[in-house]
Amino acid sequence: MTTIAVAKEKRVNIITRIRLEKLPLVAIVILVFMLITAIFSDVITPHSPYEPNLPNRLRPPSWQPGGSQEHFLGTDTLGRDLLTRIFYGARVSLTVAVAVMAFGGMLGLTLGVIAGYTGGITGGVIMRTADSFMAIPSMLLALVFAITLGPSMQTIILALSVNIWARIARVVYGEVLSVTTRDFILQAKVAGCSTRRIMALHIFPNVFNTFMVVISLQLGEVVLSEASLSFLEAGIPPPTPSWGQMVSEGRGYITSAWWIAFFPGLALALCVFALNRFGDWLRDRLDPRLRQL
Amino acid sequence: MKRYIFRRFIQTLISLLILATVIFVLARVSGNPVDLMLPQYASEEDREHMIKQLGLDRPYHIQFYEFITSALRGDMGNSIRFGRPTTELFMERLPNTLRLSGVALLFAFGIGIPLGILAGSKRGTQADSFARGVAVIGIAAPSFWVGLVLMNIFAVHLGLLPAARMGGIEHYILPGFSLSLFALAGTTRLLRSSVIENLDSEYVKFARTKGVSARMVLWKHVLKNSLIPVVTFAGMQITGMVSGSVVIETVFAWPGVGRLAYEGLVNRDYPLVQSVILIKASMVIVANFVVDILYGYIDPRIRYD
């Protein structure tokens, strides 16, 4: 009797908890699906994303006349399976996003903590530099990176990291300022902790939530920037499948083969939507004060 | 206020300096800039000659000084593809971009502001859900894709609007709307949340207690205060629109400066890309400076930040 009651209560709890925390279920489903397809793309699909199959080119999606079950979303200009390339495209988008957050995010976090805690001239110089960087339009700067260093995944990661660090540093800096005035930092100082130790062990964990929120709010934009650059042939070079570049390839075919441009763009929109949704949720949960962002 | 303007002015100069430095350094870390400027079939003598001519054999600080001063004079070399001064090409194409951006701004504010007010004042209704849907789609959907989808529907299938290139007023609708989407969504979202916030404030409660009609409260009191964040983010919208114009002009074959950057990019026309980006980015930085100054006048709180 009691066990049944407990089981029942638990089930209610999960449902109410999801409702209470307002979990963005749709976003989570989309993100999990994309993660799975990105990681296991070679296992999920029997087709190759690179191998051209010319007799099979421009096949419409399976539900359209002339489509086949083998190519659910049809094939592209070289006869490659579109769905397969979309799966691999998720891998590219997510790799770029994670790498940019790792480089640019870490740089912003480190500089933000240093600027906020040490203050003085160092802090002033760092923050003024960050403000100046924020005024420079990132897409345009990334185009210069692309033409000088040549379009590649490394270039795009570098270009987007150069842009993202400043915004992260700005938010982290503000948070560090408020943490620094708290008693436990003073106590750590009294106890004789070195500046580096205080920053690493006392300040860093306390700004981590904010950091995570800022990063997740930027993820969608990073994915979108990568796609736009790849669309302009300034991003990931072919044949590596990237959503933006796939839309660009389908551009010349919108009258005859609309699906080539349509589905990669749809995947992109869904991915960005899910990332934004998730970022908003994380912000509301962890740090509602950042609503302004 | 003077101090604020001065501080923002210095900030703007630093931004411009960083921009120029990044472009300068990038061209040099990737090898000799001459290799970016010469066509692939150029001979070794041509290369030597050009290095001498451009002064690329001189020390870096002198090169940098030259780079900045000639940029200020508006002399940024010739385009490889067009064989003409890049600044001249830029100026030729600029009006087209400005016109398109103007139309896009019209769409963004003309639709975004009413939609935001409607959503904020009628919270929880179907109109609100619609506005929120527009905002979510506008922010998440890539503009180049939306542009292509609209082109497919309205130009290819319905044949109502021209698909690409410049022309009469009907040519502005599709690219203008696609370009406005991000700003439109941003405006709607911002205005909605600030209307909601303001409707909940003390001064609104006071006005209501005083017996001011709901319509007057909304239009006279709430709207004025709610528009402040929209102005604040105008700088961000300008930046977004300038970046977006590269993509949208490429999609719609629009002969503007964005398309010029793209043409330079695919033709490996380094001088062209360099100057288009340098001028465009500088314009954005200066525009942001102006917006911030205006903002300082509208909302005095910002000056003491």
Image (cartoon, grey):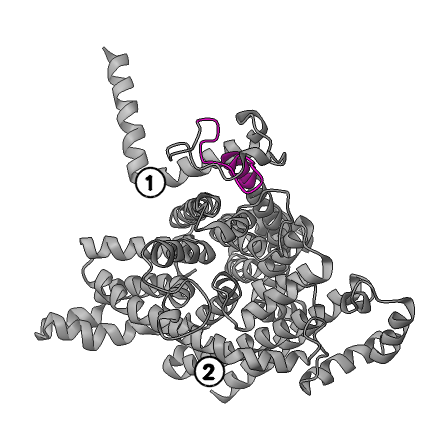
In the rendered image, residue B114, in percent from the top left (x then y), is placed at 25, 68
Secondary structure category for the residue under label 2: helix
Outermost residue toward the top in this view: A1
Q: Name the residue under label 2.
A: B293
Is residue A79 in the magenta section? yes
Task: Please name whichever residue, A86 or B280, is drawn nearer the observer in this view of the structure.
Answer: A86
- Asked whether residue A183 is in view, the answer is yes
Q: Quadrant of residue A121?
A: bottom right
In the rendered image, residue A255, in percent from the top left (x then y), is placed at 43, 51
Amino acid type, label 1 = Glu
- In the rendered structure, the answer to whether residue B241 lies left or right of residue B90 reads left
Q: In which quarter of the image is residue A136?
A: bottom right
Residue stretch rendered in magenta on the structure: A69-90
Q: Which of marks 1 and 2 is in front?
A: 2
Amino acid type, label 2 = Ile
- Asked whether residue A214 is in view, the answer is no
Tags 1 and 2 in contact by the CB under 8 Å rule?
A: no
Kindly indicate whether the residues beneath marks 1 and 2 are on one polypeptide chain.
no
**Chain containing mark 1:** A
Q: Residue at x 33, y 71 (%)?
A: B109
In the rendered image, residue A57, in percent from the top left (x then y), is placed at 54, 38
Q: Which residue is drawn at 36% across and 68% down?
A: B173
Q: How far apart are marks 1 and 2 (CA)?
A: 41 Å
In the picture shown, does residue B295 fall above or below A179? below
Task: Please name whichever residue, A250 or A180, is drawn nearer the observer in this view of the structure.
Answer: A250
Task: Please name whichever residue, A230 or A101, is drawn nearer the observer in this view of the structure.
Answer: A230
**Residue neighbourhood size for the residue with mark 2, other residues' Cα within 10 Å, grouped as few (<14), some (14–19), many (≥20):** some
Secondary structure category for the residue under label 1: helix
Q: Mark 1 points at which residue?
A: A21
Task: Please name whichever residue, A120 or A211, is drawn nearer the observer in this view of the structure.
Answer: A211
Q: How many marks?
A: 2
**Residue neighbourhood size for the residue with mark 1, other residues' Cα within 10 Å, grouped as few (<14), some (14–19), many (≥20):** few
